[in-house]
Image (cartoon, rainbow, N blue to C red):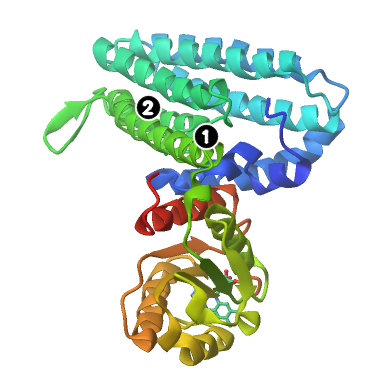
Amino acid sequence: MELEYNIEQFMRGDSIQEEMLSGKRGMLMGLYILKYPYRKILLPLAQKLVFVNPDLVSYAATVVAIGTGFCYYFAFQSPALLLLAILLTLIRMTLNTLDGVIAIARKKDSLLGEIVNALPDRYSDLFFLAGIALSPLCNRPLGLLAMASMFLVSYTGMLGKALGMEWQHQGPLGKVERLILVMIFSLIQYLVMLKGTPRAGFWGISLTPLEWCMLLYILMGQATVLNRLRGMIAQITKWEWNKKEKYQAIQKKVLVVYDSATGNTRKIAHEIGQCLRAEVKKAGEAKDIGKYDLVIIGTPNIRKFPTGKIIRFIETHKTKLKNYALFVTWGMPVWGPYATAACFGNMQKKIGRKPVGVFASKGYHAKYKTCAGHPDANDLLLAYLFGIKLAKKLGVKA
Ligand SMILES: Cc1cc2nc3c(=O)[nH]c(=O)nc-3n(C[C@H](O)[C@H](O)[C@H](O)COP(=O)(O)O)c2cc1C
């Protein structure tokens, strides 16, 4: 169950925790996107099922996973069982989605619910993966390593919670990705077996498709562990910074000056400002620039350039800037990072000196509705870390 959702977040396909640190989901981003339409389809059904106890739905998902494990175990003799395993996996995913949305509809939120959320799901993973690992279609050590890798993924996810942070959900091998991958590889396994051999070779390595899937679980699982560790380290760095109030040691005067039409750049500006105990001002309101040791200039990306107000600010005050840093928010997927690099270049050219640091963040593009939800909690955390980096440049020992 995903108890901490509200319906809107649920529809969007991300939880509060995922919003916290969903940043780099890596190569399986495409699969993650599938979650959204799937939830949209299920929502009306879930709303009709509010009378059902969501915990029972969670347990039913585990029973289904046991069935899936058996299908994999016996699939060597009867390949059609692979198709049944795919169907059961789909049913498990559906139940896992339904229990969350039913729980929200019933406003059921309890610690006991958290247990029901976590534990049966781990058992479900254990059952379906044991079925694969122990079947003749899979090299046993490979299957067991995949299982271990997957548990480490869950462990690092929970470690954040255990340390008092949020659950860590980021990384390329979350639950949905895991299940979608195994369905794809099960189908390939079935098709390969129809031809009479269970193996499929790539790059001169001959493995069964299910073994390929386990190999991916191991590699992507470890990438996910690293991702989650990085997320935790980022949060810890912010905590430590606040706890020891190192920012109080900042003796230098810092100004954050920004322009913002729809609020994205303003949010980032305030986050950096809070980290550095800086004054935060809109471009038109900033005066007396010469008194600041560091001026941090923020703008939305407008076709590779800063806004007019920021251009005017730069032209008026560039000779008074002692040190400066830049940040940009952007909202066009694919094109955005390139446009942002160009935007940094254009600002630097106008000022005629190198900045002490630059930072970029996604920001919801109100016209094209891209980068929805950004800047999210993870973006703000990264902005805060950028502030810490700048503080170090100002001589504060972090
Ligand atoms: C006129 C206009 C042009 C834009 N051009 C780009 C662009 O070239 N590349 C990009 O990634 N985003 C572009 N964006 C998106 C914004 O940079 C982005 O949504 C930004 O976060 C908005 O910041 P704000 O909420 O502080 O105004 C453009 C937005 C507008 C309104």
Q: In the image, ligand 1 is in what quadrant?
A: bottom right
Would you say residue 165 is visible in this rendering?
yes
Residue linked to disc 2: 190
286 to the left or right of 302: right
Residue linked to disc 1: 169
Task: Tell me which residue sits at (53%, 15%) in the image.
Answer: 122
**SS label for mark 1:** loop
**54 or 307: nearer the eye?**
307
Give the answer, above or below, for where 357 lies relative to 392. below
Query: Which label belongs to residue 250?
Result: none
How crowded pointer 2 is (Cα within 10 Å; few <14, some 14-19, many 20+) is rated as many
Would you say residue 331 is visible in this rendering?
no
Residue 274 position by quadrant: bottom right
Q: Amino acid at mark 2?
A: Tyr
Of the two numbered discs 1 and 2 in the rendering, the one whose residue sits closer to the viewer: 1
Cα–Cα span, label 1 and label 2: 31 Å
170 to the left or right of 202: right
**344 or 318: nearer the eye?**
318
**SS label for mark 2:** helix
